[in-house]
Image (spheres, grey):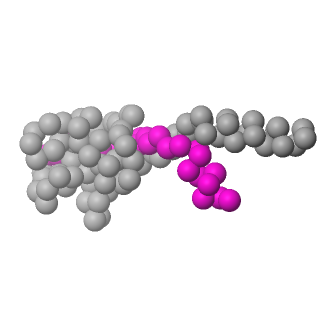
Amino acid sequence: MRALLAGLALLTLLSQAQASEVRNYFTPELDGQRINACLATGACGKPAADAFCKVEGYDQAMLFQRERSASARTIDSDKICDGDCTAFRQVKCFTERSDLQVAKTAL
C-alpha cells in the first residue's frame, strides 16, 4: 500500500514539475558562417539571439554577447556582412518543457 501511495505521489509531482533545458553556443554559426547580432529588419541584440535559438529548437535567448567579426550571416535572411561586422560571441538558449511528457515517453 505504501508503494502505491509513493508511486501516486511521484506521478503527481511529475505532472506539476517544469524543467528547463539550457544550451550555450560559443561563436555560434549557421552553415559555417558566424551569426550577425542584427536581423535583416535592423533589430539587434535580443531579437537576433532569440531568432537563432528558435532555429536551434529553443524558445528564447537568456544571455548573449557580441564581438566584432570580419564576416557574419543574418539569421533571418541570406544576407552576409563582410568587413566590419558585429557577430555573436556567445548565445545561451533556453526552453521550458513538461517533465510529464518526458516521463510518459520513458515508460
The residue that appears at 29% across and 41% down in the rendered structure is 50
Q: Is residue 9 left or right of residue 89?
A: right
- Position of 36 relative to 10 (above/below): below
Q: Is residue 4 left or right of residue 21?
A: right
- Position of 99 relative to 13 (above/below): below
Q: Is residue 77 at all visible to an observer of this figure?
A: yes
Q: Image quadrant for the N terminus?
A: top right
- Say if the magenta span includes residue 54: no
Direction bottom: furthest residue:
31
Overall secondary structure of the magenta section: strand
- Residue 21 percent coordinates (x, y): 51, 44
Corner quadrant of residue 92: top left
Which of 8 and 93 lies nearest the eye of the viewer?
Answer: 8
Q: How many marks?
A: 0
Q: Image quadrant for the C terminus?
A: bottom right
- Say if the magenta span includes residue 105: yes
Which of 88 and 94 lies nearest the eye of the viewer?
Answer: 94
Q: Is residue 69 at all visible to an observer of this figure?
A: no
Direction front: furthest residue:
1
Direction right: furthest residue:
1
The residue that appears at 61% across and 39% down in the rendered structure is 15
- Residue 106 percent coordinates (x, y): 65, 58
Which of 94 and 101 lies nearest the eye of the viewer?
Answer: 101
The residue that appears at 29% across and 64% down in the rendered structure is 32
Q: Which residues are magenta?
A: 84-107
The residue that appears at 11% across and 47% down in the rendered structure is 40
